[in-house]
Amino acid sequence: MIPPSQNPDGWNKMIVAAVPSPGTVVLSNLSRAIGWDVKNADGQKGASTSRKGQPVGKFDATFYLTDDPADGEVTDFERWDGFEALLFVSVEGAEAWGLEVVHPDLNRLGYTAIVLDKMGQVVHDKKGGGSVKVSFLEYRPPSDTDTGGPTQTKTATPGGGGGGGSDGGGPG
């Protein structure tokens, strides 16, 4: 694992559908749960355990935004509008669309695609910056062998902000 001191941007950004997040991101409530079926013995001591699939993961990301132009031209707040719209793409329509995600902690725990769960407000810090807390769910559709159908994930289109290519059709 590459430590944050050697690659701060790798830890300070989430890349969603090939688009780097604006500002600095801090992840919280991130873990990988293991699904267990625990059956207590009737009238006896002990229990039996067996694996029961893997629950869908969830986590929160807080994005810290500044009004200083990061690239000399565009502020984090200006970039946030497009990034927020990209996140909402995952829940447009009747079916969820997984957005490919890259971040060292997420990928280490097996998260490869996410969908929006909750979008928070911009909380201003009274110093010209602000933060937005966003909740995500891991996107894991049934596999092709389970459904016979394709999975649906999105990456950004060249020169675009989201939408675009997919692994199996759908909008974009």
Image (cartoon, rainbow, N blue to C red):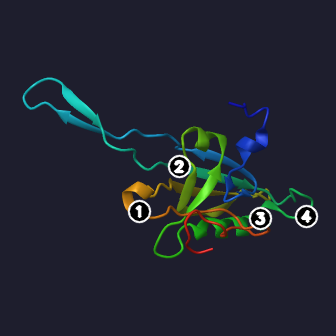
Q: In the rendered view, does 107 fall on the left or right side of 144? A: right
> Looking at this view, is 81 or 121 the one in front?
81
Disc 3: which residue: 79
Mark earlier in primary sequence (4, 3): 4
Mark 2 near mark 1, Cβ–Cβ under 8 Å?
no
Disc 4: which residue: 73
Circle 1 crowding by C-alpha within 10 Å: few under 14, some 14–19, many from 20: few
- The numbered disc on residue 59 is 2
On the image, the x and y values in percent for residue 91 come to 53, 69
C-alpha gap between disc 2 and disc 1: 29 Å
On the image, the x and y values in percent for residue 5 come to 78, 32
Please name the residue shown 92% across and 59% down the image: 72
Q: In the rendered view, does 7 fall on the left or right side of 134? A: right
Mark earlier in primary sequence (1, 4): 4
The furthest residue to the top: 45
**Please, what secondary structure does the residue beneath circle 2 have?**
strand
Give the vertical position of 109 relative to 124 (above or below).
Answer: above
Disc 1: which residue: 148
Please name the residue shown 53% across and 64% down the image: 152
Report if residue 142 is visible in the image: no
Circle 2 crowding by C-alpha within 10 Å: few under 14, some 14–19, many from 20: some
